[in-house]
Amino acid sequence: MSTVTQDPLLSVRDLVVEFPTRRGTLRALDQVSFDIAPGEVLGMVGESGAGKSITGSAIIGLIEPPGRIAGGEIRLRGERIDNLPYEQMRRIRGRRIGMVFQDPLTSLNPLYTVAQQLIQTIRTHMDVSESEARARAVALLDRVGIPAAARRIDDYPHHFSGGMRQRVVIALALAAEPELVIADEPTTALDVSVQAQIIDVLKEICAERGASVMLITHDLGVIAETADRVAVLYAGRVAEIGPVRDVIQHARHPYTRGLMGAIPTLEQDSDRLVQIPGAMPRLNAIPQGCAFNPRCEHVFDRCYKERPVLQRAAPKHQVACWLTEEGGA
Amino acid sequence: MLAFILRRVLQSLVVMLVVALVSFALFRYVGDPISTMMGQEATIADREALRERLGLNDPFIVQFFDFVTRAVQGDFGISYRLQQPVMELILSRLPATLELALVSGVLAFVFGVGFGVYTALRRRGWLSTAIMTVSLIGVSLPTFLIGVLLIWLFAVELQWLPSFGRGEVVDIGDWWRTGFLTPSGRASLILPAITLGLYQMTLIMRLVRAEMLEVLRTDYIKFARARGLSNRAIHFGHALKNTMVPVITITGLQLGAIIAFAIITETVFQWPGVGALFINSVRFVDVPVMAAYLMMIAVIFVVINLIVDLLYYAVDPRLRVERAGAGH
């Protein structure tokens, strides 16, 4: 794992993403801050709508208009990338930051062969000949575990199964050897039986190349096995962030603890899983103070008035909860 | 593939037979050809003689069977009005219509796709808004009105272009007369081609725009952007190719419609094509010409449909037969 003094590869500070609508502006992300060190795997968890995917889109500069980054900054190796002109940002996409999307069945263009899509991506970013690009493409497919890659490369996406297609997607995301890979729920659309394989392939290749990974998922099991650190998002804010072990075993934020309690285990023989009462607030109805206050069982006065800031709970473990300041729970 | 084509050809034959039956049955009600041919003074005996000679007294089934047997051999009889073989008449008029349809089809396709892509990519630009507004006019104005307006503006007021006819024509081979080779022939083509193609152009444009907007929202376009591909590669490679699949069908069918709807444009511009021939035949209850014309339109539609289906295979690999061993 990374040392404290190492410069982060990616640094996100106070990121605010807003969507103007007819009924006012919605804040999808509200002052989100986190770092990813070189070679590190950061897991990002949260319920649907917590802002996980928006964070990924914001980093790669592809927030769907009218959504926009309304504040904060994103730095890649110290360089600001959130305000780059389109053409400069385009050269970073794929080349320095790769992205894997959720659904491999729809991520590939059905009318082009895998070879065409790979070669085009490679040649967009690297100054290589058609045949060199092809050789690279075959090697990549081979590396992500496509059997008989040299022969299969000229097949169309519909010739591959879901798991195989996600391998192709990973090959495409890694084609130009990016330093950071954002994987947005890469296994959600897949069979349980191939999920682990895909995560393994992704993790291995990124480790081999020293690429960092931001793994967006709502599967805490995947995070526990894969990530070095984990960030928990709630209603567009970071609730807790820290090393995976700390967060999973010593969760500080009541929301994180609720999430942990919702995972069934073999050891515990309980009839019912722990449930967090209520639902995440809609973006137009986020309560004052702590966004979690309506659902929190430890809620007290201050939670209704002031928004908790991220505070150190343990080395490298930060929590946005007033309980932590009160001396922990 | 061969089996597919054969199956389609067989289906087409059935379609043609049905078209022949329907049109033949309809023509029994458009009026009595004898009264228009003979005039007021003819005696009843004369009328009956002609009726007998033309076979109009035979039972419907016999007449139809007779028609089909001869049609298969390319013989559609003699025109009641012009006393010439129908096949010869149609063939002599067909080049004019085909040239007109070709030019308007190409215009409609090129501008339709071009404007469609432009308005999809620059959705909020003022030029897009202008194009979309004008296209509404193209969709809603009837063809003859557009033709008359164009004649008024360009032929009467500005006097830039001729208002009727084909201009000078040149013979190519035995029966093809082209207007492409003379300046007056080309000038005469412009107004009718715009009139005939405008509706199709706006239709194609609106379809391309809608499809393109749809495709631009798909995951594979998002993924292509996330890989840093250039806008050109994304818009004109990845997006446009996917847009073209449904557009091909509509364009194909519209090409058939262009040939069929040429009737109105040909009438407005006195274009000497098959459409004008058909209109004149309707007035005269010239059943052989009408029947042959309808059969010709049916053949054109059927052939275009077949070509469209084959084009599908060329564009969309998912329809092609799976290669052996390519599955898993």
Image: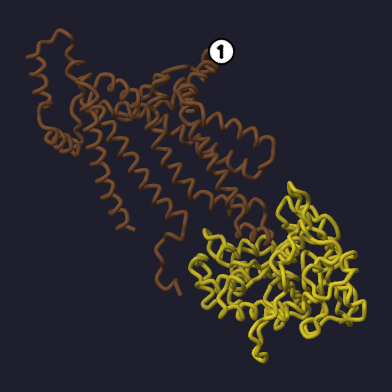
Chain colours: A yellow, B brown
Q: Nearer the viewer, residue A169 or A125?
A: A169
Answer yes or no: is residue B205 visible. Answer: yes
Task: Determine whether, in the image, residue B315 is placed left or right of residue B19.
Answer: right
Residue bearing the label numbered 1: B157
The x, y position of residue A269, in whole percent, is 65, 90
Above-or-below relation of A180 to B228:
below
Q: Is residue A238 above or below residue B194?
A: below
**What residue appears at the point 67 percent right and 58 percent down from the top-left corner?**
B225
Residue A95 seen in render: no
Q: Where is residue B298 in the image (x, y as percent from the top left)?
A: 31, 38
Q: In the rendered structure, which amino acid carries the disc numbered 1?
A: Glu
> Which picture quadrant has residue A271?
bottom right
Give the image location of residue A180, x and y in percent. 75, 70
Q: Position of residue B87 (x, y in %)?
A: 24, 30
In which image quadrant can residue A93 be found? bottom right
Q: Does A15 appear above or below B192?
A: below
Compared across the picture, whether A231 is left or right of B30 comes to right
Categorize mark 1 by other alpha carbons within 10 Å: few (<14), some (14-19), many (20+).
few
Location of the C terminus of chain A (image quadrant)? bottom right
Of all residues, the one furthest to the right in this rendering is A326
Q: Is residue B9 above or below residue B176?
A: below
Q: Is residue B144 left or right of residue A85?
A: left
Identified at 59% across, 66% down, the residue is A103
Q: Which of B85 and B177 is in front in this view?
A: B85
Q: Quadrant of the N terminus of chain A?
A: bottom right
